[in-house]
Image (cartoon, rainbow, N blue to C red):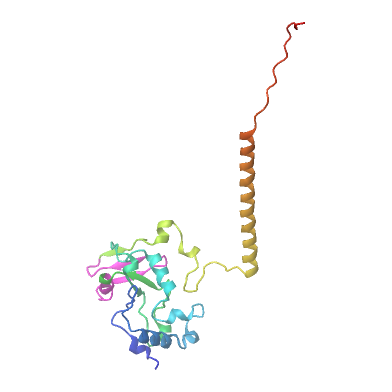
Amino acid sequence: MDADPADCATPADDVPAGDTRADAELSTNCGAAAEAGSTESGDPGLPDSAYVYRPTAVLDAWLRILCGTCQWPHCDAPAWNADLDHDEPFNHADPTRGGTTTAAGMKAYCRTHHRIKHSGTWAERHNPDRSIDYISPTGHRYHSRATGYLDLLGIHPDDITDPDGRSHRRRRTRAEDKAASIRAERRRQQTRTDRKKTRHAASAAANHHPTTNPAPSNGPRDR
């Protein structure tokens, strides 16, 4: 029997890391109920999975790579052990009107800071660069720092196709992919040929021993 998305709501918008405790059947029914009809009024640029509560395995891993650690200020808890939280609460009754399950719409928080986030005592503002501004109950402001693995490698996320189906780069056609593959193979073959020539020249130079003829003598010959 299909589940009503309203019955799938939880007290906190909580997607634990490696969550195996949730009831599998209920999770499946919730996903099916949330996905049904999502393409009619949702963003046509997003896949159906954007309107399902739990992220796919690929998106789950991608989010943890992007975050690196808990996104709360000064918290170094690894994202791999953290919960994945929607920036805007997921609307189980109408998924197209709530937060989306995408790389741009979710963050990682350790369990402690996840609960603090949902306590309502802190305010937050999400910026286009994935950073977050936090406002404490006392009015103090904090700004999250970049802690993702791509940040450490100096790679901008826009240079990589997001697993939620949104690509910031133009996708190549099959013909373009084939042509690029041929060019790459030609470069590899040329590199191998050049290396062989270099080794052959070095080996020939090492084995070359020029013969030295004695200089002719101008002295008298013995008769």
Residue at x 47%, y 71% (from the top left corner): 163
- Tell me which residue sits at (36%, 63%) in the image: 68
The residue furthest left is 138
Figure quadrant of residue 31: bottom left
Toward the bottom, the furthest residue is 1
| x and y, in percent, of residue 94 in the image | 40, 87
Seen from the viewer's position, the closer of residues 96 and 159 is: 159
Quarter occupied by residue 30: bottom left
Task: Check the image and name the residue furthest to the front.
Answer: 223
- The residue sitting at the right extreme is 223
Q: Which residues are magenta?
A: 113-139
Image quadrant containing the C terminus: top right
Above or below: residue 140 compared with residue 119: above
Q: How many marks?
A: 0
Residue 207 horizontal/vertical position (percent) = 63, 34
Q: Position of residue 179 (x, y in %)?
A: 65, 63
Q: Is residue 122 shown in magenta?
A: yes
Residue 178 lies in the magenta-colored region: no
Q: Position of residue 114 (x, y in %)?
A: 28, 72
Q: At 44% from the left edge and 85% from the top edge, which residue is drawn?
A: 35
Q: Along the line of sight, which residue is nearer the eye, 36 or 23?
A: 23
Taking 83 as reference, is 49 left or right? right
Whether residue 174 sits left or right of residue 216 in the image: it is left
| Front one among 206 and 49 | 206
Q: Which image quarter: residue 63? A: bottom left
Q: Quadrant of the N terminus?
A: bottom left
| Camera-side residue of 81 and 95 | 81
Residue drawn at (41%, 59%) of the image: 151
Side (left or right) of 22 relative to 196: left
Q: Is residue 58 above or below residue 200?
A: below
